[in-house]
Image (cartoon, rainbow, N blue to C red):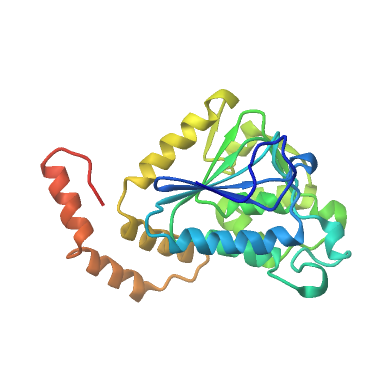
Amino acid sequence: MTDGPSSQGGDAPSTPVLTIEGPRATIRLNRPRHLNRLQPEDLGALMALFDRVEADAGLRVLVLTGTGRAFSAGFDLGAIGGGPETSPAGGAGPSFEAVVDRLEDLALPTICRLNGGVYGGSTDLALACDFRIGVDTAEMFMPAARLGLHYYPNGIKRYVSRLGVDNAKHLFLTAEKIGAAEMLRIGYLTGMVAADALDAEVERLAALLAGNAPAAMRGMKRAINEFARGMLDDAAARRRHQDSLSGSEIQEGMKSFAEKRAPRF
């Protein structure tokens, strides 16, 4: 099932395209002629797609990727009139920061399929995903310091919490480009593969996530994100833990373990 224009690179560019196959949703950035550089209208489209995916109880995992040879060249700075990379022109629609925060907080697990280079704000978009599988020819850089841009706070916070203070300083303050091997070493990539193995690895991980208990994953993802921000709601996390001990998911999980079969959540 595809919502919107075809995502093939030869077709006209468009706002992001949603494809649903069983329990897996894929959102594909679709402006390949400009390395999937995001426009203001893409921000509202992404918000709507995130809402749709999260509202579909049949979906268990989301894959975010790009069309063509790059994942994304980031947000079009020209579209915001030289202002900070947090608000579209005229202040209409969601900010880039709000879109990335929404992606990070999606209830279902997310995989970024990095089919190529990732630059500028899109480095944060990918970082907001739970997993990032990239090709071994990928590269990234954060040019904020070179552009005279003080990056928005939540993006800096994500860099620090995911990659550590030293790596965040290196990427933000030097604006130096790094390759896939270094991206893997610092933890930006959670997996690196040859281009011809990318789809198989993403499919393997997506199938693994889709087969696990959705409520348990949703609660643990929330707790992990809160803890990374230094804002863990301990009481809520403990309630979810306690509820899980008598819930339907643990009953099926324990039964399937005893019967030596895959669980059916």
Q: Is residue 247 at least partly visible in the picture?
A: yes
**Residue shown at 38% from the left, 46% from the top:** 209
Front-most of 73 and 30?
Answer: 30
For this view, does 211 lie left or right of residue 121? Answer: left
- Above or below: residue 3 compared with residue 84: above
**Residue shown at 76% from the left, 49% from the top:** 37
Q: Indicate the position of residue 129 as horizontal and vertical percent values.
A: 54, 52
Q: Is residue 105 at least partly visible in the picture?
A: no
Tally the numbered discs.
0
Judged from this view, the residue extending furthest toward the left is 258
Q: Quadrant of residue 140?
A: top right
Front-most of 20 and 87?
Answer: 20
For this view, does 207 lie left or right of residue 15? Answer: left
- Above or below: residue 112 compared with residue 80: above
**Residue shown at 77% from the left, 67% from the top:** 88
For this view, does 219 lie left or right of residue 90? Answer: left
For this view, does 170 lie left or right of residue 62? Answer: right
Q: Indicate the position of residue 97 as horizontal and vertical percent values.
A: 67, 65
**Residue shown at 69% from the left, 51% from the top:** 122
Q: Quadrant of residue 141?
A: top right
Front-most of 59 and 223?
Answer: 59
Q: Quadrant of residue 239?
A: bottom left
Q: Indicate the position of residue 162 as horizontal and vertical percent values.
A: 56, 53
